[in-house]
Every structure is written in structure tokens, then in C-alpha cells.
Amino acid sequence: MKLLEIKRIEGKIILKTGLHIGAGSDEIHIGGVDTPVVKDPLTNRPYIPGSSLKGKIRTILEWSTNRVDLEKGGPYATNDSNDNIARIFGNGRNEKDYSGGPTRVSFSDCFMNEEKAEEMLKRNALTEEKIEVSIDRVRGTVGGGGPRRIERVPAGAEFEFSISYKVFDMGDGGKEDEKNFNLLLMGMKLLEFDSLGGSGSRGYGKIRFEDVSINGESINFEEINVDKDTLNEFVRQ
């Protein structure tokens, strides 16, 4: 097994709607938000954890390629060294006999675009509070939980993202990893159709990728198609 190349995918994530990725605060202060967003402890600015981006892209590709077992539940894991998803994102197990090689993709944390963050700071708008209530659908009244104050990163915020992808020669000249790289790009496109973070069914977390480059060369991300026939080549039978 020989490392042939490390591809870099870089660009911006633009929020089309408010984004909530929770910080898991243990305290609720009087007059404060119930569920704060995760923030960089050095700058106190919101950021998108690389784990959140990786987890959502992996999940949506697993759904798209028939790798979700509703009866067993839990995350998908396999010891099949030829499994495409396992090669890209990791096999989810620690068996010593796994021969598919190391995880191919690495996601960096996504920090706010400096220029956009300064612009938002001038308006004191790095985050927003959204009040939500649970409605009793039978009575049409507010449920017992009462109003909740949800902190979100507002629409229009921009984050810088960086993804690295390793191409190995597994006796095939790197052809399988090159093919799986295209699957990763389709997963990013599928994420644009879905949502990132929490409460996606309520309109949160709609994003788009902009200014995307691969190894420093700009690409037109809008032209990337989630081709059904191509995706079917990766479906697990």
C-alpha cells in the first residue's frame, strides 16, 4: 500500500438559514438561551466542528447507498475491506484483520470567514435567539415544556472549510480511491439538498458550498451532479 496523493478540497460554507450545532451547556442562566451553539473558546465565535460535517455527509451517503439497517440501528460499521463508505470515512471498528487501509478523508473544524465575522460583529449579530414552543396538536395550545430560547448562527454567515483526502495504491494504481473521491463530492452535494446541525425538519441548517477548489484549482460546484446511475454503483446489496 502506497500513498499516491493527498487531495485538498477547500472553500466556503454559506448559511442559507439559521444553523444550530449545540454546545451541550450544563447550565441555564436566567434570561439566557436554553441551547447555545458551539463556540471557539479563544474568539467566542461560532464554528462548525469537522465531526459534524463528516458525520452528516457520511450519514446521507449511507442512506443513499442502502447501508442503514433499521432493525439493528446505530451507526453503520463493517469489516469489509472493499466497502466504499468504510474506506472513505473509516470502518467504525478496530479489528486488526481489516485490510482496507486508513480512513481516507479528514475534516477540519470550519471557522468563520474573518471579513464576514467583522461585518456581523459591527451589527452585534454573530448569533441570534429564536424562541420556539411545543404545540399540543389536539388542543392547539402551548405544550407543557413552555417556550425555549434557541441560539443560532444567522443566515448569511460564512465559514471556511478544508477537507483532505488520501489516495492509496492498493494494487490498483489508486483507481478505487479516485472513484470514491467522486462519491465524497456527491455526498457534499447531497448535504446541500438536506441540512446540517439540529432541527433540519424545522428549516434550520440549509447551506451551500461556494468558492470550492481542489488542490488550489477552482471548480464549479454547481455542476456536480448526484447522478442516480452513478450512485447506484455504490449501493450495498
Image: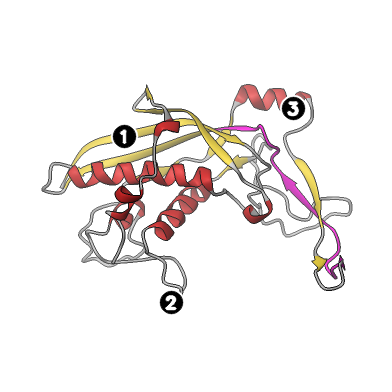
Q: Residues within 10 Å of mark 2 (few under 14, many from 20)?
A: few
Which disc is residue 7 wearing? 1
Q: Residue at 41%, 54% (x, y): give it.
A: 61
Q: Is residue 62 above or below residue 204?
A: below
In x, y percent, where is residue 157?
A: 65, 33
> Residue 114's x, y, as percent?
61, 25
Q: Residue 59 falls in which quadrant of the image?
A: bottom left
Identity of the amino acid at label 3?
Leu
How far separated are the C-alphas under marks 1 and 3? 34 Å
Q: Name the N-terminal-most of marks 1 and 3.
A: 1
| Residue range highlighted in magenta | 141-159
Task: Please name the colour scheme applied to the rendered image.
Answer: secondary structure
Quarter of the figure with residue 127:
top right
Q: Residue 42 at x, y = what percent?
A: 64, 36
Picture residue at 31% right of the left edge, 66% below the top = 78
Q: Tell me the residue that label 2 is attached to.
A: 72
SS label for mark 1: strand
Question: Label 2 to label 1, Cα distance in Å?
Answer: 35 Å
Sequence-first tag of 3 and 2? 2
